[in-house]
Amino acid sequence: MTKPEITQSQKRFQESVGALFHENKPTFLFIKSSTDLGVIRNGGRNGARFAPQSFLSTFKKFSQDLHLKEQSFLEFEVSDEIHEKQNFHEAQIAESQRIEKILKDHPGKKVCHIGGGHDHIYPLLRAYSHQYKKIVVLNIDAHADTRTDTEFHSGTPFRQFSTEFDGDFFIFQIGLHPFANSFSTLSPLNKGKSVELFKKDLNPENLNKLFKQVSDVVDEKTLVVFSLDADALNGYEVPGVSAVNPAGISRTELLDLWKRYTGLKLSHAPVLGIYELNPLYDSLASISMRNMASFVFEGF
């Protein structure tokens, strides 16, 4: 029996990144948190809940490249909007437990966590906290997300985590704006250390100094997470976000930061979080999704 010829669309799919999503020896995990209640609780625009699927839809359409040929991807959904509406903090804990199980079932893999709001980095950090007693976060963001509010949301995750974590916590904030952070937000953490590098001071010399501080605290037992709030980037490059940045970092600067991160002496595979993308406010050309998806494509 003659084997039927594959169609043009089938051929294109076979040559796309989408064809690399399967369960055969995965090397890369996409963990999706498709809720944005934390953003809304923080007074932000809804729509970030659609970001994980929109991002992956764009990513899967890219053509395979030699550096991705040996990769295989898995994706998981870990959030629960109904639970969040019933009890937000309990839902955060349940989400962290789901993430922790995924990490245990697939140890040593590259991880890209996609929100949703930036509140979802709290469950991610909590999931890793049982394995690591020293955690460093590189937070690329216009906002420090260390608000002192008693109700948890997308603006509180780092202060929330640092208060609960019983190990050593360091957060290096890169790209902040004075107009986006109140005095109370930038007040010292109750536990842990925060170092800020504002966008106006972002230059190679200051970055070298900051990454020297990072490397000084990193050892073989340290987890280092690269947390990217998409509103850290220029609004004309990434308009589809919860809070558009009029003077953000460029995509070129972002790739430089990622290169510096992967140049650290990490004892684990890269851990990347991408948050606050909002496809409802993206351009008709989906430039935000294409910029972020191509960043992951090039970065890994």
Image (spheres, rainbow, N blue to C red):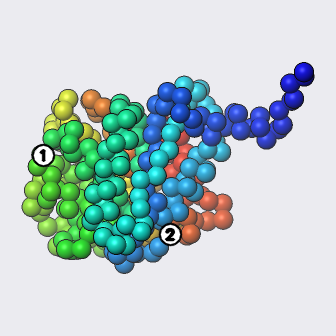
Q: Write the residue at 20% across / 29% down.
A: 220
Classify 10 Å Cα crowding around label 2: few (below 14), some (14-19), many (20 and above).
Answer: many
Proximity of marks 1 and 2: CB atoms separated by less than 8 Å: no
Which residue lies under the disc numbered 2? 47
Whole-percent x, y for residue 252 in the image: 47, 47
Q: Earlier in the sequence, mark 1 or mark 2?
A: 2
Residue placed furthest toward the top: 1
Residue 206 visible here = no
Inspect the image, locate mark 1, and give the three-letter code of the amino acid beneath it: Asp
Q: Is residue 209 left or right of residue 100?
A: left
Q: Write the residue at 30% across / 60% down.
A: 92
Which residue lies under the disc numbered 1? 168
* Frontmost residue, 86 versus 109: 86
Image quadrant where residue 101 sits: top left
Whole-percent x, y for residue 10 in the image: 77, 37
Inspect the image, locate mark 2, and give the three-letter code of the amino acid beneath it: Gly
Q: Is residue 281 left or right of residue 115?
A: right
Residue 297 visible here = yes
Asked if 249 appears above or below 266 in the picture, the reply is below
* Frontmost residue, 121 versus 299: 121
Find numbered disc 2 in the image and state the secondary structure of the residue it sits on: loop
* Frontmost residue, 172 versus 149: 149
* Frontmost residue, 240 versus 69: 69
Whole-percent x, y for residue 20 in the image: 59, 34
Find numbered disc 1 in the image and state the secondary structure of the residue it sits on: strand
Image quadrant where residue 1 sits: top right
Whole-percent x, y for residue 207 in the image: 28, 46
Asked if 274 appears above or below 160 in the picture, the reply is above
Q: Is residue 214 left or right of residue 61?
A: left
Classify 10 Å Cα crowding around label 1: few (below 14), some (14-19), many (20 and above).
Answer: some
Q: Write the residue at 35% across / 49% down.
A: 98
Q: Write the residue at 38% across / 45% down.
A: 272
